[in-house]
Amino acid sequence: MWNLRNEYGSTLVESLVAVSLFGLTVVAIGDLLTREIQLERANGTTTTAVCLAESELEDLHAQDYDDIASHSSTTTVEGATYAVQTKVVTDSPARSLKSVTTTVSWTEARGPKSYSVDTIYLNPRIED
């Protein structure tokens, strides 16, 4: 007759349970890493869009007030294509002001995205 108290080691069932738990842990960590990489990529494209919008506004700020006008362009950064559209409305919201909206649009794996910035420029040579 077998004496189980003197047996050392693990049974097949214990080994299968241990391997199963290890496998579930690896799958969960792999899923977290995949999501983290996707979020990092999305954050990177959003940060690029914000920088493009800020750069556009700085370029407009450097121009003479009378030269500020609506326009659009396309830029490719690290394989992603961004459409930059600037809309200028003269005498809005009041006389001698220009309302400017810059929108940067791009497409991610989860679909199209956009980032907009609104500002107002004052004519430094206000005429009465």
Image (cartoon, grey):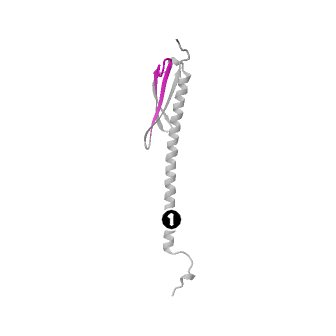
Q: Is residue 80 left or right of residue 8?
A: left
Question: In the picture shown, does residue 68 fall above or below 79?
Answer: above
Magenta stretch, main secondary structure, is strand
Classed neighbour count for the residue bearing mark 1: other residues with Cα under 10 Å, few (<14), some (14–19), many (≥20): few
Circle 1: residue type: Leu
Residue 41 location (% of width, % of height): 51, 44
Residue 98 location (% of width, % of height): 49, 21
Q: Which residues are magenta?
A: 86-107
Residue 72 location (% of width, % of height): 45, 27
Question: In the picture shown, does residue 85 fall above or below 79?
Answer: above
Residue drawn at point x = 52 percent, y = 36 percent: 48
Residue drawn at point x = 50 percent, y = 20 percent: 97
Residue drawn at point x = 47 percent, y = 31 percent: 103
Could you say which is closer to the camera, residue 116 or residue 2? 116
Question: In the picture shown, does residue 20 fall above or below 8?
Answer: above
Element type where label 1 sits in the image:
helix
Furthest-left residue in this view: 111
Furthest-top residue in this view: 128
Question: In the picture shown, does residue 62 fall above or below 53?
Answer: above
All told, the count of numbered labels is: 1
Decide whether residue 92 is among the magenta residues. yes
Circle 1 residue? 21
Residue drawn at point x = 51 percent, y = 53 percent: 32
Residue 82 location (% of width, % of height): 47, 34
